[in-house]
Image: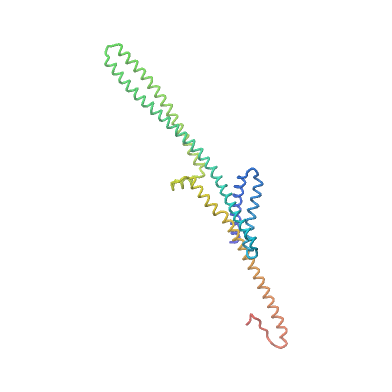
Amino acid sequence: MFTLLMFISSLLVAGCAAYFSVQGLATLYSGFFISVCIMAGSLELGKLVAASYLHIYWNKTSLLLKTYLLIAILTLMTITSLGIFGFLTSAYQKSHVKIEIIETQRQSLLMEKTYTQNEIDNFTKRTETLNGIRLIQEKRVEDAGNYKVPREQAYEAINKANKEIEESKNKISELNNIVKNLDIKLLNLKEEESKSSDIGTLKFVAELFNTDIEKIVKWFTIAIVLVFDPLAVCLVLAYSNIIKNKQNKIVLEEEKKEFDDVETSKSKRFSKILKPFKIKYKDNKSV
């Protein structure tokens, strides 16, 4: 059961490492995508076979061949790791671009909302000023008494103030509607971000350590790369070692069985020869 589990684990990890590496390299050389996939896949298979070969036949391999295969394996592991790094980085960039677009839209809406709110404040202050002017003119009407000219001037100023106040109120109402629409758009963006935020966990970690998310992603990706391909190679070697030990055990059992058969045959033959002399044959087992 453990052997089967080791086989499945090594197959999955090595397969995933090969897939991510091939995808990363093929994306880098996208002009010949299929050709690069075939080349990279062949190199991945060759790397695992070479590592298994060295593990099994280390003592039977010449120094020159061992040296070359070691250099080739380490070089291919480096290439695989770079391919995985490129693949993961590309995947992150796609998610990050979505978040950047949403963030840009949010900032634009917030700026528009701030500008609109300032306009509302300005019209509100203007309305308060006009109300003050109207009160002053109403007092002029009271103070004018029976004087016609001052009264007419005051009424004209009051009517003008009333007209501007009405226009300001209408404008404030329009601007408030704009603010409400902007708030709705901001809520929609927040909902969209919650659905498409594939890097929400990394953002939380970045905020926790008070650092840039780019640094968190970089080191997190490097940690994955440093474990991925070496683990794949080690699992393949471990599975190869299990198979080798099982084969050695089978060979030993067969040799032991063959030796026992030979001893049994020898014992029977000597017993048959010594039987007329009434001498009992004792083999090594009976000693």
The residue under the point 47% across, 45% down is 212
Q: Residue furthest bottom?
A: 277
Q: Nearer the viewer, residue 205 or 70?
A: 70
Is residue 66 positioned above or below 125 on the image?
Answer: below
Q: Quadrant of residue 247?
A: bottom right
Q: Nearer the viewer, residue 269 or 45?
A: 45
Residue 233 x %, y %: 59, 57
Q: Does any portion of residue 1 appear in the rendered image?
A: no
Is residue 168 positioned above or below 144 on the image?
Answer: below
Residue 279 x %, y %: 69, 87
Q: Does any portion of residue 281 appear in the rendered image?
A: yes
Is residue 80 positioned above or below 164 on the image?
Answer: below
Question: As drawn, is 13 to the left or to the right of 193?
Answer: right
Question: As drawn, is 286 to the left or to the right of 173?
Answer: right
Residue 6 x %, y %: 59, 59
The residue under the point 57% across, 50% down is 82
Q: Nearer the viewer, residue 286 or 149?
A: 149
Q: Nearer the viewer, residue 41 or 243?
A: 41
Residue 73 x %, y %: 61, 56
Is residue 285 positioned above or below 21 on the image?
Answer: below
Quadrant that contains the C terminus: bottom right
Instruction: Please tell me how many numbered marks the rendered image carries.
Output: 0
Question: As drawn, is 165 to the left or to the right of 274?
Answer: left
Name the colouring of the figure: rainbow
Q: Quadrant of residue 278?
A: bottom right
Quadrant that contains the N terminus: bottom right
The residue under the point 54% across, 43% down is 93
